[in-house]
Amino acid sequence: MVKEFINEIHAITTKPWTLMEICGGQTHSLVRNGILEMLPDKITMVHGPGCPVCVTSVSIIDEAVFLSEQPDTILCSFGDMLRVPGSKKSLLEAKAAGADIRILYSPLEAVQIALNNPDKQVVFFAVGFETTAPANALSVVQADKMGLNNFSILASHVLVPPAMEAILSDKDNKIDAFLAAGHVCTIMGIGEYFPVAAKYQCPIVVTGFEPVDLLQGILMAVRQLEKGEFTVENQYARNVKREGNQMAQDTIHEVFGISDRIWRGIGNIPQSGYEVNERYKKFNARVKFNIDIPFAEENKECISGDIMKGLKKPKQCPNFGTKCRPEHPLGAPMVSSEGACAAYYQYANTDTVLA
Amino acid sequence: MCLAIPGKIIAITAQLDDTFRTARVSFGGIQKEINLCMIPDAAIGDYVMVHVGVAISKVDEVEAAKIFSYLKDMGEVGELESFS
C-alpha cells in the first residue's frame, strides 16, 4: 500500500506544491517514518501549529505559574506543559521552588483530587485542541454535579479552523493544501472545513497519522491540486464520521464559549479559542483568582511563529540544537515530542534532507 | 498528547445516571478507569478510542490492534504507563 501511494504521488505530480499537516502527531509520524524523503522534490511538507503545548502563549504559562504559587493551591497539568518557558520561569521551575504541581493523565483525576482535598483549591491547566475539549469540559460538569467549590480550570483551548484561516490569509502564505487532523474531526466532524476550503480555494483532506494514512492523504490533496479542485475529503473515514461525536460537541458547548486566543509565535487569532462560559464562571480560574498578569512578549530568539506558519524549517533557526535543545528549550516547539523542532532534533536522519 | 489510544472495555464500573458511566479499559494489558459519557452505546467487549481519560469513539478490533501497535512503536503509549 505504502509503495503504491508513493508511486502514484510521483506519477501525478507535475507542479511544485506546498502542503501543511495540521496535527503534531502527523508531524512526528512524517519525520520519524522518513516519509519526507519518499516524496517527490516538488512536494514540500510544512509542519503546522497543531501541537497544543507549542501554541500556548508565554502569558498563559505565566498565569499557570501564578496560580501554582497561590497559598493552599494544587495546580494540575498534562506533563508536557511543565517545561514550556514562561516569561520568568516554567512550571517545572515553580515546582522545584516548592509549588504543589501535579502531572495528571486526565482532567477527571483533578476533580478527584479536589474531592479528596476540600481545604485546597485545585486548578486544572486545560490546554488542548478540539480533541481534548470534551474531557476538559466534562471535568467542569462533573465538579458542578458534585457541588465542588474548590475546583476550577485555566482554559487555554485552541481551535483548528480559525488557525487555518489565519495561515491562509497571511500575506506570506505558501500553503496550497491542508491535511486536517483526524482526531480533532472525530469530535467535531468535517462540516466546518467546507467554508474554509471554498473561501481560500484550498483542498483540505482529513487524514490519520499512520504512514499509510499520511501518504494517502497527501495523494488525495495532490490529486485535487493537479486538477484545480478544492474541496474537503475524508481519508480517515474509518475513525471520522461526517457529523463527529454529538455528545462530545454538546459537552463542549455546555461549558465553553468561543473566545479570542493568543497563539505563541502567531499572535491573537480572533474567535480561535474556548473560554469557560458565564453559566460555569465559578469554575473559571481567571475569574476565581482574579488573575491580572501583564502581557508578556515571546522570547525573540525563538522563531516558532515562522515555523508554525510554515515560513521556516527548524534547521533554519540559528539556535536549533545549540542554544535551543529539548532539555533547554527556548520555545515550545522544542518541548513536546509533537513539536516540529523536537521532531527534527530527535530524528537525526532528517539532517540529510534539510542539508 | 492529542492522540487517542484504543482500548477494550473490560467492565462497567459505575453508572451515576443515564449517560455518566465509567469503565475499566485495557490498553494492551494496562488497565485504567475511563469515562464513557461520550459513547452512550459502548458495552463490555467493545473497543474504544480514549483520549485523556475519556472515550471519544468506537473502533473495531482489527483497527484497534493496528493503531495500538503503531502507537507503541511510536512511543506514544508511555503516557498510560507512567500513570498506571
Image: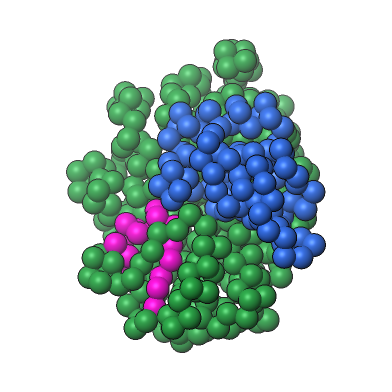
Q: Nearer the viewer, residue A38 or A224?
A: A38
Chain coloured green here = A
Looking at the picture, does residue A116 appear above or below residue A334?
Answer: below
Q: Nearer the viewer, residue A94 or B40?
A: B40
Residue B4, image quadrant = top right
* Display colour for chain B: blue
Going by the image, does A106 lie left or right of A99? right
State the count of labels. 0
Q: Which residues are magenta?
A: A73-92
Spot occupied by residue A102 in the image (x, y as percentages of width and height):
38, 64
Residue A212, image quadrant = top right
Residue drawn 52% across and 74% down? A115
Spot occupied by residue A56 in the image (x, y as percentages of width and height):
44, 61
Residue drawn 67% across and 75% down? A145
> Residue A207: in sight, yes or no?
yes
Going by the image, does A210 lie left or right of A236? left
Looking at the picture, does residue B38 appear above or below residue A97?
Answer: above
Spot occupied by residue A183 in the image (x, y as percentages of width and height):
62, 44
Spot occupied by residue A164 in the image (x, y as percentages of width and height):
59, 51
Looking at the picture, does residue A336 appear above or below residue A35?
Answer: below
Name of the residue lying farthest toward the left = A322
Answer whether residue A91 is magenta in the image. Answer: yes
Residue drawn 61% across and 39% down? B7
Answer whether residue A145 is magenta in the image. Answer: no
Q: Nearer the viewer, residue A238 or B54?
A: B54
> Residue A173: in sight, yes or no?
no
Q: Nearer the viewer, residue A144 or A30?
A: A144
